[in-house]
Amino acid sequence: MSAESDFIAALRAMPLPSAARGLRDDAAVLELGGTKLVLTHDMIVEGIHFLPDDPPGDVAWKLVAVNLSDLAGKGARPLGILLGFSLGQDRDWDRAFLKGLESALHAFGIGLLGGDTVAAPAAAPRFLGMTALGEATGAIPSRSGGRDGDILWVSGSIGDAGAGLKLATGQVEASDRASDELIERYRTPRPRLEAGQALAPLVSAMMDVSDGLLIDAQRMAAASGVKVVIALDAVPLSGAYLAVIGDDRAARIAAATAGDDYELLFAARHNDAPRIHAISERFGLAFTQVGRFTAGSGLELRDGESPVALPPALGFEHERRLSEADPRG
């Protein structure tokens, strides 16, 4: 097991209220009277989740968006956020961050409830945290509700943010408007809040795609006690991705293992497809069938009729990223 898995396993051995959902979901659900509060907390770290030269306003947007995306995966309406901010030596950076934060709060129609600030040592990377609170009025889907025979769907397109990161770091040469679109997807993701609220009553399981389609599908399947089969040829790619990265098998595997998409991943019965398509049309957001759940365990990847060997990394993992960033391994 990884260090992160060991740490989370130790947390699960502690006293946990029912609201914690066993620490096996993306959010806690606290019922107070007739109100269902959904709570989530995410952190982003300079050099891991955002680049040192990313615009500070975009960093603020991303911090808000990744937290609201967890609420979207639970079908919750956001109520407000709590901010944890590490003050650096660059006051201009801090001011630009605040301006971006204000823009994001206006865009999503939520307010700042409070939080905390700390002073970071000189030259230390920025650690930024946020807690988002939401409210749900009906069913709150978990990761663990998938069933044998369910169809697995994903919203929007996959791989854009990963391609944007490659462009921003010079791994792929930026050339045209398509490149700008991909970099925007990396820096300023759009949580699928309204679609998540509409889908919540229909789905058997739902979460957002944050670490990569393959790794998150595997996590949903493991939580649900089923096997997941992913159709690589069905993974939806945007026109911008196709223009910059391509459409061969390697490009599709790169898309399916890239993080930061913040699309919705959900499982539903086959006969729910007409209602899912109606929600797609209502919001102008594509929903694509990318796989299915079957009896068993694990992840199977197929390209048409051909089985495909799983890549060494199914998506973003903290330990892998840290070891790659550290020359000591």
Image: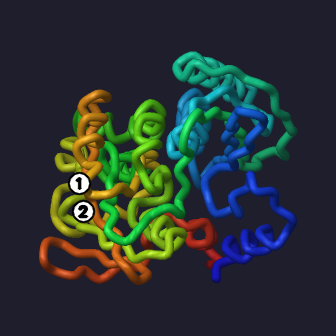
Residue carrying label 1: 245
The colour scheme is rainbow
Q: Quadrant of the N terminus?
A: bottom right
Label 2 crowd (10 A; few <14 / some 14-19 / many >=20): some
Question: What type is the residue that disc 2 sits on?
Answer: Ala
- Can you give x and y, in whole percent of width and height, for residue 8 in the image? 73, 69
- Can you give x and y, in whole percent of width and height, for residue 311 in the image? 36, 77
- Residue at (25% x, 53% y) in the render: 271
- Residue at (45% x, 39% y) in the render: 196
Q: Secondary structure at mark 1?
A: loop
Q: Quadrant of residue 250?
A: bottom left
Label 1 crowd (10 A; few <14 / some 14-19 / many >=20): many
- Residue at (37% x, 71% y) in the render: 148
Q: Earlier in the sequence, mark 1 or mark 2?
A: 1
Q: Secondary structure at mark 2?
A: helix
State the residue in front, 185 or 178.
185
Q: Quadrant of the C terminus?
A: bottom right
Q: How many angstroms separate mark 1 from mark 2 (CA)? A: 6 Å
Tell me if residue 16 comes above or below residue 5 in the rendering. above
**Relative side of 46 to 245, left or right:** right
Question: What type is the residue that disc 1 sits on?
Answer: Ile
Tell me if residue 48 comes above or below residue 321 in the rendering. above
Residue 155 shows which numbered tag?
A: none
Residue carrying label 2: 251
Q: Is residue 31 visible?
A: yes
**Relative side of 183 to 131, left or right:** left
Query: Pointers 1 and 2 in contact (CB under 8 A)?
Result: yes
- Residue at (81% x, 57% y) in the render: 17
